[in-house]
Image (tube, helix red, strand yellow):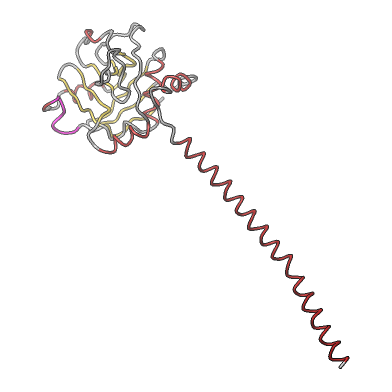
Amino acid sequence: MQIQRFYSFTILLLFLMVSCGETPKKKQNTAEETITQKDSVERDSIEKKKKEKEKFVLTEDNAIDFFFDYQKGLTENKVKITTSYGSFTVELYDNVPYHKANFIYLTKKGYFNGTQFHRVVKNFIIQGGSSDDKETARKRREIGRYLLPPDTRKGYKHHRGTISMPSSEIDNPHMLASPYEFFIVVTNPGSYHLDGDFTPFGRVISGMDVVDEINHVEVGDGDWPHQNVYIEKAEIVN
């Protein structure tokens, strides 16, 4: 009987030793899971902050401050615009900082790609940067809704080849500029009746023949070309 009790006690002791030996493993696994969960939370937090930063939207309240900072140290001043009729290059004036910064910013955001020259008035202007498709509307929503103040006192006139910015069509007594659109003067020597109302912010330095060709397309109601004239790509060049 004593031998049987001894064997029973020994088996119980071994069982307890084995059970005790497993416990730290369970604690280790729990610790590892906690670390993994912590890393996951940190990664999610970083991704969330990154997405929030990417979702920055321009508004009437922040646009001027944003472009004031954006134009500091901005060295790019030439944009090549490739259309379905060929390409031309514009040079932007350094001392019209908000309009220059806006055009560079929109170019880098890829906004102009896929937009159209939606208004063509023979021997006067071609106007681009708009479109009637959903993609352009989506881009505008993502970039933001804002206007730019006129900057007409820098001495620039609407000579032939000047790129300028139209005013917004909304109730706009101060002639604030519609930032997503631009027009180029084709009149020779210029359309000087526009001076003082609109802001010249650059000029065509090459490819004016392409601008002229676009200016001669057939148009319908509202001066919209019968056949869409696309801006296939706008890009910064040296």
Using the image as rendered, state which of residue 163 and residue 170 is in the foreground.
170
Q: Nearer the viewer, residue 236 or 181?
A: 181
In the depicted structure, whether residue 98 falls above or below residue 114: above
Residue 228 image offset from top left, x and y in percent: 18, 33
Q: In this view, does 191 lie above or below 227?
A: above
Q: Main secondary structure of the magenta part?
A: loop
Residue 224 colored in magenta in the image: yes
What residue is drawn where x is 41% and y is 24%?
A: 238
Q: Position of residue 95 (x, y in %)?
A: 41, 12
Q: How many labels does the image show?
A: 0
Taking the spot 76% from the left edge, 70% from the top edge, the residue there is 21
Residue 43 point in image, percent of width and height: 56, 47
Residue most toward the front? 1
Q: Give the range drawn in magenta.
A: 222-228
Observer-nearest of 25 and 130: 25
Q: Quadrant of residue 225?
A: top left
* Quarter of the N terminus within the rendering: bottom right
Left or right of 15? Residue 151 is left
User: Percent x, y for residue 178?
Assistant: 30, 21
At x 33%, y 13%, the residue is 150
Residue 109 magenta-highlighted: no
Residue positioned most to the bottom:
1
